[in-house]
Image (spheres, grey):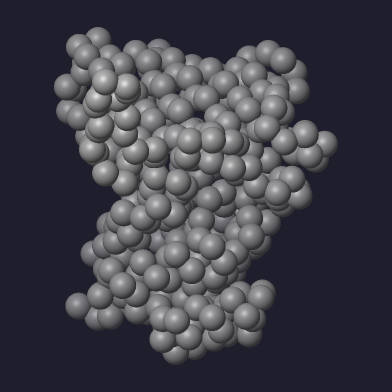
Amino acid sequence: MKLLNIGIIGVGRIGSLHAKSVTYNIPSVKVLGITDVNAANSQAVASELGIEKIYDDYRQMLADPEIDAVMICSSTDTHADIAVEAAAAGKHIFCEKPVDLTPEKVYAVIEAVQKAGVKLQVGFNRRFDHNFARIEQMTRNGEIGDVHIIKITSRDPAPPPAEYSAVSGGMFLDMTIHDFDMARFLAGSEVTEVYANATCLVDPAIGEAGDVDTAVISLTFANGAVGVIDNSRKAVYGYDQRVEVFGSKGTLYAQNDTPNNVTLMNECSVSSEKPLYFFLERYMQSFRDEVLQFIDAIQNGKNTPTSVDDGLKSLLVALAAKESVAAKRPVPVKY
């Protein structure tokens, strides 16, 4: 099979992670080139991984006929515009979440992708996590009967800088959007109503920037199930990522991943390892596997496992959550 050449737009934390993962783990794909608004980032990543091409900007990459697909890992406010241009250039697209902070721009991406006939996958990597994917598979197989309750705990080990909220869209659009997608994925149904209770308890500067850092969110699904997500920007013990799906015939529960599963029991206490520290450690396997499925979709003419529509629907849930906090009431999701 022909070697697939990809270009990565933005090689900060997540872009460089993808560059390393593809280079070291996916021999059927070559990272042919990269670009970043910070030239030093491009130089460092290219030097470390032996990447041939460094482009002055993303448009130069899109004009390169050797590039088959691009991974958009730049800042959130650039995703949609770059995706539209990439589609027009005939490039398949892997786009980190969120596609955009506004539905209007996401609709423009959907139109551009459909018109060009290219693939687009959104980076909801948690669907590919070994624990969560197994829970979804067992749920779809009917092993716990009808889904009644979904519980998601998602807590970061440390908050981002307060100024990050200005470009990220805030916690619901930046962090919780993964949880909204996971809730849809596990329920096999769309969220119809959101009731979010949120505040700022971790960093006052985040509140001064107009965002929240602590939340409990109640969800209602079209299939009658209910769900709850609890978020915090700071869990002092590490990256807390747990899921439970409770049904009419049983429950499925995924604990945190830890560096090892050894437990010490003695006369004083019972102790084990803390969770893996953050997403770079916790979700490496899922980052690899989501790209493998993206490549499989391109090479074998399949649908991508996550689409722009998934990005749009999770965005609409996130916007309803923000409205719910402001209005202090349940809010229907406006599809």
Question: On the picture, is 5 further left or further right than 88?
Answer: left
Q: Residue at x 43, y 15 (%)?
A: 226
Q: Residue at x 64, y 60 (%)?
A: 75
Whether residue 77 is visible, yes or no, is: yes
Task: Classify 248 as above or below 317.
Answer: above
Q: Quadrant of residue 120?
A: bottom left
Question: On the picture, is 225 further left or further right than 172?
Answer: left
Task: Classify 125 as above or below 332.
Answer: below
Q: Residue at x 44, y 89 (%)?
A: 52
Provide residue 137's location: percent of width, then percent of height.
Answer: 22, 34
* Camera-side residue of 176 and 269: 269
Q: Quadrant of residue 255?
A: top left
Task: Classify 50 as above or below 152.
Answer: below
Provide residue 126's location: percent of width, then percent of height.
Answer: 39, 44
| Quarter containing the N terminus | bottom left
Residue with the most extreme top position: 248
Q: Residue at x 41, y 81 (%)?
A: 49
* Camera-side residue of 160 and 295: 160
Residue with the most extreme front position: 267
Q: Quadrant of residue 145?
A: top left
Provide residue 169's location: percent of width, then percent of height.
Answer: 68, 44
